[in-house]
Amino acid sequence: MTGTGKRLTPEERELEEKTRELEEIHAGLAQRELDLATIQRDLHAFEWRYVRTIGLLYLELDELEVLIAESLAKRRPRAAKANPPIQAAFIHQRAQASARECSGFAGADGDPTEASTRPETAPQLRRLYLDVAKQLHPDLTVDPEQRARRERLMSDANAAYRKGDQRALRSIIEQWESDPEAVPGAGVAAELIRTIRKVAQVRLRLQGIEEEMAALETSDLWHLRDRLQAPGPGGSLMDEMGRTIGREIEKAKNRLAELTAQEDAR
């Protein structure tokens, strides 16, 4: 019976139970979506930092080695032919590859490291993202058209979260609250079927999230981040790598200056 004394039909009792179950796992789904989005954002931010620091240093070193190799090839053409890996063309290919990698990240939609340091990243941004996920997650509808629309909005929400864009998240919520799909259907039997399918879809998505997170946590990028961000005597390993490459750059600059001075003296 309900609080008013009305006796529930078996379908109504089942609907109540399934509705409670859906509410419970739905809350958990929103949190796991946030966890996954946070991991993806953090890995993307690390990848950006790595390419924009270590990658650019390697690019500078490659370019210096190109100039050194070209200078040596002019002075000792026979030696260059006998040892092709140090020829200018070979090193030039490495420099071009580094340039393409760095330019590819430079063309991305903004620097993700900026979002990770903005004040709005926590906690209000997290609350906004959770509100979005709770209201319009794709697995909460069985209608193909509405599911596609929810997927697009969730994709926009993920992008806004990575950028730390509260305004965009609020706009997504406002769009959704005026959508007719938010109005529930009529009839206990039909609603029960929809609820059962929603529960199944949410459970399937939860399983998918766990698989995605497991894949990220065993990826090369994850291990590289852990290794390079581990603290050491002189800072992180990434900091140490930057200093090491910096010293190599200085050596290359000095070597190039010597060769240039020798050429000028001839």
Image (spheres, rainbow, N blue to C red):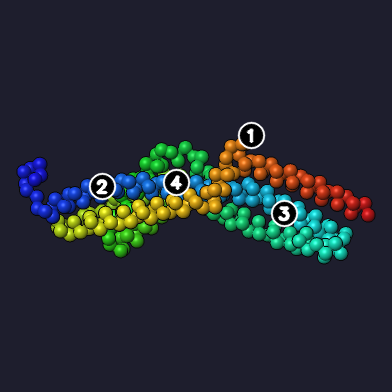
Quadrant (top left/top right/bottom left/bottom right) for the C terminus: bottom right
Q: Secondary structure at mark 3?
A: helix
- Relative height, residue 204 to residue 237 (above, below): below
Q: Nearer the viewer, mark 1 or mark 4?
A: 1
4 or 3: tag closer to the N-terminus: 4
For badge 3, the amino acid type reads Asp
For badge 2, the amino acid type reads Glu
Residue extending farthest to the top is 233
Mark pair 4, 3: CA separation: 34 Å
Q: Secondary structure at mark 1?
A: loop
Q: Residue at x 65, y 35 (%)?
A: 234
Q: According to the image, label 4 marks what residue?
A: 38
Q: Residue 23, labelled with which disc? A: 2
Residue 181 in sight: no
Q: Nearer the viewer, residue 20 or 113?
A: 20
Q: According to the image, label 3 marks what residue?
A: 62
243 left or right, relative to 67: left
Measured as percent of width and height from the top left, residue 233 is found at: 64, 34
Q: Residue at x 32, y 46 (%)?
A: 28
Mark pair 2, 4: CA separation: 23 Å
Q: Mark 2 packing: few (<14 Cα in 10 Å), some, or many (20+)?
A: some
2 or 1: tag closer to the N-terminus: 2
154 left or right, relative to 142: right
Total marks in image: 4
For badge 1, the amino acid type reads Pro
Q: Residues at badges 4 and 3 in contact (C-beta under 8 Å)?
A: no
Mark pair 3, 2: CA separation: 56 Å
Q: Residue at x 69, y 59 (%)?
A: 94
Residue 106 in sight: yes
3 or 1: tag closer to the N-terminus: 3
Q: According to the image, label 1 marks what residue?
A: 233
Mark pair 1, 4: CA separation: 29 Å
